[in-house]
Image (tube, coloured by chain):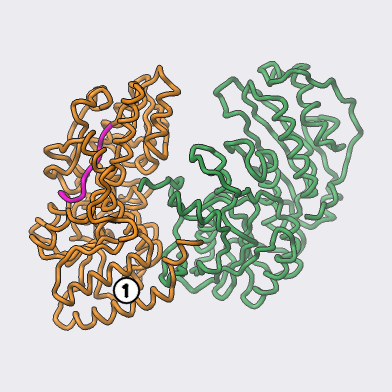
């Protein structure tokens, strides 16, 4: 397939792996633990597993799967709020497919749908707006979810609804932002990260300048990466190269999509519709300052949080769940005490098991061959 | 596809009733009275036209001696069809209902002979649509060489079902000496498919319309009994055949690995996929290994016969894209691994629930 196969060339992959190996072998002389590279974005996690990238790399490199799956970091209290809105008579609740299985404290949207709530899967917020136009006697709520990648499209949909006067459309805003979260992770006292693969499509919107604090304040390299397997390998090579040369810089591997200043039109739409929340609650990570946005007052009539009564309760994560440690890279998914036992994709306890981009679901689905090999060796002994 | 000899008849002809001249099905058509008999006669019996069905008893009857001409064991299966949309590129619910049950018989090594057809119709469905679907069933049955010999019709109130549900059950006869089983795979066996994977799943996704994608992908819905005849003829030691319907080949391979307590390794670059299906999967973040097929089989044969099995399938119109996609390994038992084209390896696990499109 044109423009796809070029980025999956096995010959080029082998050359990159050899180059990474060379550099890492030189580094390993004065290291007593593997290099921990965090891929921030769930899309990268997915690519790493889908193409078997982790087991092409030398054991001196370990991926730590970051918080960049917006479905995974959604706290249970917000899911409960979704369900309360969805179960309001007259409401058509619309959502991206991923969010259907995220567990709330009592049920998921999928279960609420089975119980009779009118919940529909859409592929774009514009589909929700279209539903609102077609059902003027119903309230159509769109579950706005995601990082800066999806923010512009929801912002523009709200602006469109306002322009045409479709007032039975509203947004339940759960958008979150990447930079504040990265800072929170970097401030962790038990941080074990040596470098980052930066998110590609978030950066397409916000640009790369915004990450300058990472090398400046924390002396860690970050390479913004594309999502094709060669992109990921190339970015790993660039991170390793920086470490070998003693550099810590922001580099842009995904130059074909990401401009340094981001996308001004998208940023303007975000700025117009949204403002920072003082705090936003993340599953596993707790409350993070200025890490989420809400709708500005002028768009109050499109704000589902103001239109509908929601319980808005903070619900603690299940006690046994170690999503937080996994998100921070302290534990591998397999090391969590409930992984594959109480927590499986059929019955997810933690959200990392829900979305295909969640680290735990990826481990479960595509497997960690290296880990499995170790495990079967241990079992045999 | 070669038209096979229709199954044999048993009973005398019955006088047909009046045709129906309303546009839509109403509850009256399910009432058990004249309206129902007219609907059944006009829409179904007239096109399924075969002597077993015509007497309209409560059951079809077969002479055991006729059945035993084909082999020594009876195979019996049932499947329900609730697909949305009812019509899609490459087929409709009627064709699907016939092919699905024919294929479930054929993959066990049985020669499919007789089918039942039970329909549950939501009131308000257009008679013209029913006719079209009944025609399509008759055509598929003729292509597969089976007869639809008994059935049932129910009409339910609006909202009690989604337009039309069809259940077909089927019986077939397994030839002497054939022993196909999911527990029979052994290390060294080869794994084959008869062509490009995922067409049905991709066609249905595109046809649902909520993606606003136009595509040229057609469902692969087809009766594979002729193809399987060819395969068994060329490779009598074939160990296992399964049609890779819901859950795609990933589910079939996992069931096989588990039941036979073996490992399976397939190669991404050997796995046939249409470029359109690949493209749709790229856009939606879906994995083609999990997409449904309705005319594709997974077959396991001893390694030494892999090439002759492939060549035999490739001679049949439904096997033009036949390929050896992998082999059975010593294990770990139950694990299916794919060697990616990119050079890595990954586990291909069972799918949990439905594949949901990713958001970003």
Q: Residue at x 77, y 60 (%)?
A: B175
Residue at mark 1: chain: A
User: Quadrant location of residue A211?
Assistant: bottom left
In the rendered image, is residue B77 in sight? no
x and y, in percent, of residue B36 in the image = 74, 21
Q: Quadrant of the C terminus of chain A?
A: bottom left
Q: Is residue B96 above or below residue A335?
A: above
Q: Residue at 77% across / 55% down in the picture? A: B1
Asked if one can make out residue B226 in the rendered structure from this viewpoint, the answer is: yes
First to last magenta residue range: A172-180
Name the residue rendered at 25%, 42% in the picture: A74
Classify mark 1: helix, strand or loop. Answer: loop
Residue placed most toward the observer, A235 or B303: A235
Chain letter for orange, please. A
Q: Position of residue A228 (x, y in %)?
A: 38, 62
Q: Which residue is mark 1?
A: A57
Is A310 located above or below residue A276 in the figure?
Answer: above
Residue B199 versus residue A142 in the image, above or below: below
Chain identifier, colour green: B
- The spot of residue A197 in percent (x, y) is 25, 62
- Residue A188, position in %: x, y? 10, 56
Is residue A178 one of those drawn in magenta?
yes
Q: Nearer the viewer, residue A262 or A233?
A: A262
- Look at the picture and state if A221 lies above or below A207: below
């Amino acid at each position: 397939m044109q423009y796809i196969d070029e980025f999956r060339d096995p010959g080029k992959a082998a050359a990159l792996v050899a180059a990474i190996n060379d550099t890492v072998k030189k580094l390993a002389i004065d290291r007593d633990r593997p290099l921990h590279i965090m891929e921030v974005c769930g899309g990268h996690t997915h690519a790493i597993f889908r193409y078997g990238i982790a087991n092409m790399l030398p054991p001196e490199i370990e991926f730590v799967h970051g918080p960049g799956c917006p479905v995974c970091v959604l706290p249970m209290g917000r899911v409960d709020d979704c369900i309360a809105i969805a179960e309001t008579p007259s409401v058509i609740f619309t959502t991206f497919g991923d969010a259907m299985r995220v567990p709330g404290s009592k049920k998921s949207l999928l279960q609420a749908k089975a119980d009779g709530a009118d919940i529909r899967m859409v592929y774009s917020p514009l589909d929700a707006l279209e539903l609102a136009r077609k059902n003027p006697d119903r309230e159509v709520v769109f579950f706005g979810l995601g990082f800066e990648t999806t923010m512009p499209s929801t912002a523009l949909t709200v602006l469109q609804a306002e322009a045409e006067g479709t007032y039975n459309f509203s947004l339940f805003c759960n958008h979150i932002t990447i930079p504040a979260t990265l800072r929170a992770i970097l401030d962790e006292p038990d941080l074990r990260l040596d470098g980052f693969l930066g998110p590609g499509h978030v950066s397409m919107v916000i640009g790369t300048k915004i990450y300058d604090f990472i090398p400046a304040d924390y002396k860690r390299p970050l390479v913004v990466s594309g999502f094709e397997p060669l992109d990921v390998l190339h970015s790993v090579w660039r991170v390793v190269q920086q470490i070998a040369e003693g550099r810590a810089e922001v580099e842009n591997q995904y130059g074909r999509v990401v401009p340094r200043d981001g996308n001004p039109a998208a940023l303007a739409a975000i700025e117009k519709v949204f403002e920072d929340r003082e705090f936003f609650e993340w599953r596993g990570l707790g409350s993070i300052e200025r890490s989420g946005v809400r709708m500005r007052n002028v768009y109050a009539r499109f704000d589902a949080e103001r239109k509908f009564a929601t319980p808005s309760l903070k619900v603690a994560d299940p006690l046994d769940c170690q999503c937080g440690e996994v998100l921070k890279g302290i534990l591998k998914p397999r090391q969590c005490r409930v992984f594959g036992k109480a927590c499986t994709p059929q019955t997810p306890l933690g959200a990392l098991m829900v979305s295909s981009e969640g680290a735990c679901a990826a481990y479960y689905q595509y497997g960690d061959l290296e880990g499995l090999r170790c495990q079967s060796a241990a079992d045999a002994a | 596809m070669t038209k096979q000899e229709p199954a044999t008849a048993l009973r005398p002809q019955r006088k047909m009733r009046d045709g129906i001249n309303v546009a839509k099905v109403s509850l009256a058509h399910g009432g058990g009275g004249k309206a129902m008999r007219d609907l059944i006669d006009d829409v179904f019996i007239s096109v399924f036209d075969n002597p077993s069905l015509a007497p309209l008893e409560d059951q079809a009857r077969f002479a055991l001696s006729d059945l035993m001409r084909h082999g020594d064991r009876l195979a019996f299966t049932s499947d329900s069809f609730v697909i949305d949309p009812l019509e899609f590129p490459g087929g409709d619910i009627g064709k699907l209902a016939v092919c699905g049950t024919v294929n479930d018989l054929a993959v066990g090594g049985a020669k499919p002979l007789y089918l039942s057809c039970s329909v549950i119709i939501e009131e308000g469905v257009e008679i013209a649509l029913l006719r079209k679907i009944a025609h399509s069933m008759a055509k598929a049955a003729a292509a597969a060489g089976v007869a639809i010999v008994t059935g049932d019709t129910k009409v339910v109130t609006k909202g009690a079902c989604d337009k039309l549900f069809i259940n077909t059950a089927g019986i077939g006869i397994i030839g002497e000496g054939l022993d196909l089983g999911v527990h029979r795979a052994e290390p060294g066996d080869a794994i084959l498919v008869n062509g490009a994977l995922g067409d049905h799943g991709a066609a249905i996704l595109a046809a649902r319309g909520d993606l606003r994608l136009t595509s040229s992908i057609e469902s692969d819905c087809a009766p594979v009994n002729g193809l399987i005849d060819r395969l068994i003829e060329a490779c009598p030691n074939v160990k296992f055949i399964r049609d890779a319907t819901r859950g795609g080949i990933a589910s079939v391979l996992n069931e096989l690995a588990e039941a036979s307590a073996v490992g399976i390794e397939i190669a991404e670059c050997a796995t046939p996929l249409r470029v359109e299906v690949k493209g749709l999967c790229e856009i939606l973040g879906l994995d083609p290994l999990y997409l449904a097929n309705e005319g594709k089989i997974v077959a396991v044969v001893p390694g030494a016969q892999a090439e002759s099995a492939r060549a035999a399938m490739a001679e049949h119109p439904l096997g033009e894209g036949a390929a050896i996609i992998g082999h059975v390994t010593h294990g770990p038992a139950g694990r299916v691994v794919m060697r990616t084209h990119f050079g890595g390896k990954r586990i291909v696990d069972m799918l949990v629930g439905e594949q949901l499109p990713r958001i970003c």
